[in-house]
Amino acid sequence: MKKIEVAVLTGLLITTSSVVSAETLRWARAGDSLTMDPHSQNEGPTHALAQQIYEPLISPDMEAKPIPALATSWNVKEGNANVWEFKLREGVKFHGGEDFTAEDVVFSFNRAKMESSDMKELIVSVTEVRAVGDYMVEIETDGPNPILPNNLTNLFMMDKGWAEENNSAKPAEFDDGEETYAVRNANGTGAYILESREPDTKTVLKANPDYWGKDEFPLAATEIIYTPIQNAATRVAALLSGEVDLIQDVPVQDLSRVASTDGLIVNNAPQNRTIFFGLNSGAADLESDNIEGKNPFADVRVRRAMNIAIDRDAIKQVVMRGQSAPTGVIIPPFVNGWTEELDAYPKADIDAAKALMDEAGYGDGFEVTLNCPNDRYINDEAICQAAVGMMSKIGITANLVAQSKAQHFPLISGKTTDFYLLGWGVPTFDSEYVFNFLVHSTTEDRGSWNGAQFSNADVDSMIQSLASEVDLDKRNETIASIWSTVQEEQVYLPIHNQVLNWGMSSKIDFPVQPEDQPHFKFLKMSN
């Protein structure tokens, strides 16, 4: 595996930052959770908040390794390779006092498979979930699925009775702005209970006094106050002044300042997330361009021209201040299927890009809208601004529209954007996850984030075969074949893998989690 070079920043212990109490942790990041409904959105900050309140059967730890959570053990059923058995943890209660049982697991899986769920691709191979008594479930798949447990670390368990009583038996339809009780309220089994929720303003959590893991985890914070602060300067100022104790996204331009401030430290690590541009190559005509009757992105020569017009090294040095790892593929090195050959990225070549544009019949260029979030990824809007300049060199006028992720993401999942920025992490650490969401043709249970509207029947068949292929060598050959087509067709324009920088009080002992998920039950206070 290729090593990502990361500058390790260390801070000095001093006194200007407030001392973190053992009772309250004040946490901030650029964007808020999109919803409290645990199956409505498959999105990083949404999962990060949900992980404090809800729990999956198998949980990622602070190294993103799977550990038992609501399941204490799991195995393939003897005599039936299509069935996984999960033994459930006994004596667990939801925050409302309800017992956690197999009935809740069956309900949660069925809910997560519904059309309005953004989690359905994770369990697309699941055909049935059965309760075997109160504390055992069987999960049957449409063929042997050796990596099913990998897909469950963000699949949260809900109380069946609570959901039904509150008219939340199905996930809220996020793209349509549907409001249900579960969108603003929660009833999980996790280490922290939702005490109050003001979207985009403040969320308060309190320690769960009946948490099953209270003797297994440090649980140093008894209260967590979560405040989204979109403005980078304001976010850093809050950390420097002691108004907050931890921010997940220290702006790259402020790393040295934070790390050299008494009482603060910066912890960093490569992130399991790739930043890239998507192009709507599947539509007959684009809505936002000035070319009538055809789609310039449908020509692979245009997509390749745009790929080599991007100067990834310049983005790394100027926009990211060295805190990124340029790449040529939309998976990070953590993920099964990654190779150095895939990771290799082209150097910017404007002359070659112009030649491709001319060959494709677009030598005079064209205009198109570029949609970008401004509160989700590290310097996301600045990356888009840099791309606007790079595209202009080959005659493409990209009209930038930057807005909150709450407005940006529905454009992609709703297939109403032509050119967009997206970041993608891979919690399963396997390429199948990427293929199911981003590469497979959009169907009822796959391709929900395929804003490129890429569609290839042969590729779809290969993707579908991965869920039940038990010969891992053959499976990896199929993965390599799919990536070969994705790269040859230039479905996406990869930019870089992110580097995480968490700034915090020196009183906190808390490593950076590769998926950018701070599981606060692991947090300790340093001496």
Image (cartoon, helix red, strand yellow):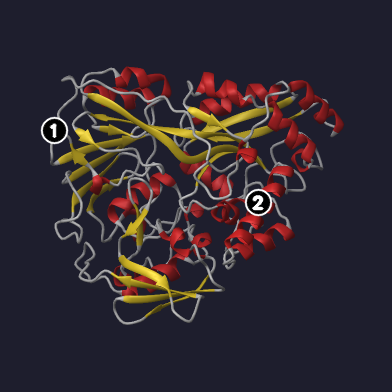
Tally of marks: 2
Residue with the mark numbered 1: 527
The residue drawn where x is 54% and y is 68% is 125
Tell which circle, 1 or 2, labels the residue nearer the N-terminal end. Answer: 2
Q: Quadrant of residue 292?
A: top right
Find disc 2 in the rendering and name its residue.
480
Q: Which of these two is toward me, 493 or 368?
A: 493
Query: Looking at the figure, which quarter contains the C terminus?
Result: top left
Residue that appears at 72% across and 20% down: 393
Distance from the alpha carbon under mark 1 to that under mark 2: 48 Å
**Percent coordinates x, y for residue 147 in the rendering:** 49, 62
Could you say which is closer to the camera, residue 41 or residue 328? 328
Residue 445, horizontal then vertical, whole percent = 57, 63
Foreground of the two, 251 or 396: 251
Res 413 seen here: yes
Residue 420 in view, yes or no? no
The residue shown at (22%, 70%) is 98
Q: Amino acid at mark 1?
A: Asn
In the displayed structure, 275 sits above or below 93; it is above
User: Disc 2 residue type?
Assistant: Ala
**Which of the pair 401/372 is nearer the observer?**
372
Question: Relative to 123, is 286 on the left or the right?
Answer: right
Q: Is residue 305 left or right of residue 388?
A: right
Badge 2, how many Cα within 10 Å: few under 14, some, many 20+? some
Q: Note whether 436 is above or below 34 in the view shown.
A: below
**How far across and down, in percent of the image, does residue 375 sit?**
44, 34
Quarter of image, res 495: top right
Label 1 element class: loop
Secondary structure under tag 2 reads helix
Indicate left or right for 147 with 440 as reference.
left
